[in-house]
Amino acid sequence: MKELATVKKFDLILDPTGKEKCDIVIKRLKKEFLPLAVDGVKDKEGYEKVRRAKGLMVSTRTSIEGGRKELNEDAQTFIKNTNAEAKRLIGEMAPVEEHLKAELKKVDDEKKRIAEEKARKVQEKAQGRLNQLQAVNASLSINEIIALDDATFENILKAATETFEIEKARLAEIEKQKKEEAERLEKQRKEQEEIAEQQRQAQEKIDKEREKIEAEKRTIAEAKAKEEAEKLRQAEIEAAKKRAKKEAEEELKRKELAKLEAEKKAKAKAERLERLKPDKEKLLAFAETIKATEAPVVKSDEAKVVVEQVQALINKIYIYIQERSNTL
């Protein structure tokens, strides 16, 4: 591999010598690199050869690209020819580079798969251990569980299981005692209910006797209250009759006074109307006089507007005198 010559940027000049040199180099690269392969993850030497070959192919390709760009500066025609040649050369090299990349990717992908598989198994084992611990009310973090070797974990699980069984037995005993206490309390409750029922029946009998006596007392009290109420009702009737008679007499007096007051007001109103009658007649006559006033005949539009406004005012004055006169 060290003896292989790379394509220099000035080898791209399209003369028979330069082109021939480039073709020779690419053929040698194909011949030596296409057969390269990596035989699995453990083939470190093969992997390194492919990696170095790929690096040489990349550097050769970038050298061609660099030469193409520099030579393009000379002339447009030369640039066109250079681009075409570079494209051709890169096209010739592409299968080699893709082959090398594919060989490297196979190994890299296998390494990744192996690492992921290893991590998955570690995680599954850790989860299984965690489930075992949680089953006996014990717990560690995933990282702590992963760090434990099998013997250490088994010792921890054994100790946790023994503690769990002891606690389980203790709780079972407590539950048994609670059940016995609940049965005792239930028996006691039933006995107290029987006593309470007997007391209730006895109290019910006493209450019925007391209710009978109270009913007899209420009957007597109601009869007495009824008699008293009748006396009170009769007294209220007599008092109501007296009040009605008095109110009738007072109402008669009020009506007589109201009649006299109405007659007095009517007389005063008639006297006032009679007194104001001459003035009212004069005001009404004055209103008619104002209404009958004839406006002068004018010719100009301005004067006609004034006449119309005056006639409107005269009409308003007429109506005002009429309305106010009727209030006298």
Image (cartoon, rainbow, N blue to C red):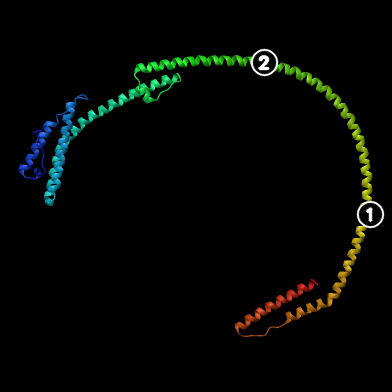
Q: Is residue 314 above or below residue 100?
A: below
Residue at 83% x, 23% y is 210
10 Å neighbourhood of mark 2: few (<14), some, or many (≥20)?
A: few
Type of amino acid under label 2: Gln
10 Å neighbourhood of mark 1: few (<14), some, or many (≥20)?
A: few
Name the spot of residue 128 as percent of width and height, x first. 39, 20
* SS at mark 2 in the image: helix
Please count the marks in the image.
2
The one of 17 and 303 positioned closer to us in this rendering = 17
Can residue 95 be seen here? The reply is no
82 horizontally vs 188: left or right: left
Q: Residue at label 2?
A: 188
For the N terminus, the image quarter is top left
For the C terminus, the image quarter is bottom right
Name the spot of residue 220 as percent of width and height, x first. 90, 29
Q: Residue at label 1?
A: 249
Rendered image: mark on residue 74: none
Residue at 12% x, 46% y is 82
Q: Is residue 131 above or below residue 72?
A: above
> Mark 1 or mark 2: which is in front?
2
Type of amino acid under label 1: Glu
Residue at 52% x, 15% y is 170
